[in-house]
Amino acid sequence: MASRIGTSSNDISADERVYAAIASALLQGKLAPGAQLVERELAAAFDCTRGTIRKVLARLGAEGKLTLEANRGAFVPSPTPADIREAYRARQVVEAGIVASLCGALNARALRALRAHVKAEQRALKSGNVAECVRLAGDFHVLLAQLAGAPDVQAFLAKLVAKTELYKALFDPSKLSNCSSDEHGRLVDALENGKLPAALTAMRTHIDELEARVLAQAGEARTNDLATLFAHA
């Protein structure tokens, strides 16, 4: 199929290169909350057009990874402690219901999928792959919602998980993952054994710890030099 008018394969490659670099920087906590991503500076850093930067920033804004303000530009989200608590509280409520629906009701296939996922998390952690660790950690929770057989709940939880992953990256970038594969393993054990109180406690404690780590760092200032940050992207 012919390319669209005015869009070359090089332009498409540039879009994806810039998108991947900025998204990765966000996920790894390299960009400070509230930092402005200036088109001119990014275009110089990536050696591309401002049009390419504008498209990428719009895409990241649509995904909720950046905040776009009319006549001002693109900014890294800067959630307040209240915003953070609200997001994790929502996860507590939603995921408690998921745990209750799955406890003692998982079939062999579902348990194999969960065990395989935990092993994948362990491999990613061992390899030091930051992006994969974060992705798998969030996907575990979404997988639980999928196994519960509630597509609307799964979609809602996926948005909550994406939001809290970003909060973690912004305020607790020191760890490879915002979740522990060991904690996930213990939760799967409780679900398999039909121990609802233990399963609920495991999930509640797990999310409480994630929230506490983020809140402990919220508000600490960091600075950005876009040219240095993306010099080798």
Image (cartoon, rainbow, N blue to C red):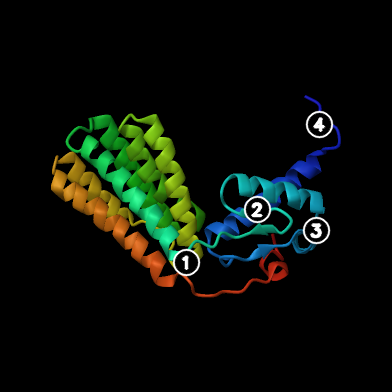
Question: In the drawing, does residue 165 fall left or right of residue 143?
Answer: right
Residue 122 lies, in percent from the top left, at 36, 53
Residue shown at 80%/54% (left/top)?
Answer: 48
The label on residue 68 is 2
Q: Quadrant of the C terminus?
A: bottom right
SS type, badge 3: loop
| Above/below status of 98 relative to 230 | above
Proximity of marks 3 and 4: CB atoms separated by less than 8 Å: no
Label 1 neighbour load within 10 Å: few <14, some 14-19, many 20+ = many
Q: Amino acid at mark 3?
A: Asp
Of mark 2 and mark 4, the one earlier in the sequence is: 4
Label 2 neighbour load within 10 Å: few <14, some 14-19, many 20+ = some
Question: In the drawing, does residue 75 fall left or right of residue 115?
Answer: right
Front tag of 2 and 4: 2
Residue 170 lies, in percent from the top left, at 51, 63
Of mark 1 and mark 4, the one earlier in the sequence is: 4
Residue for badge 3: 47
Residue shown at 34%/65% (left/top)?
Answer: 212
Of mark 2 and mark 1, the one earlier in the sequence is: 2
Label 4 neighbour load within 10 Å: few <14, some 14-19, many 20+ = few
201 or 67: nearer the eye?
A: 67
SS type, badge 1: helix
Residue 18 lies, in percent from the top left, at 70, 52
Residue for badge 4: 4
Q: Amino acid at mark 2?
A: Leu
| Above/below status of 160 relative to 217 | above
117 or 93: nearer the eye?
A: 93
- Distance from Cα at disc 3 to Cα at disc 1: 29 Å
Q: Quadrant of residue 5?
A: top right
Residue shown at 37%/45% (left/top)?
Answer: 140
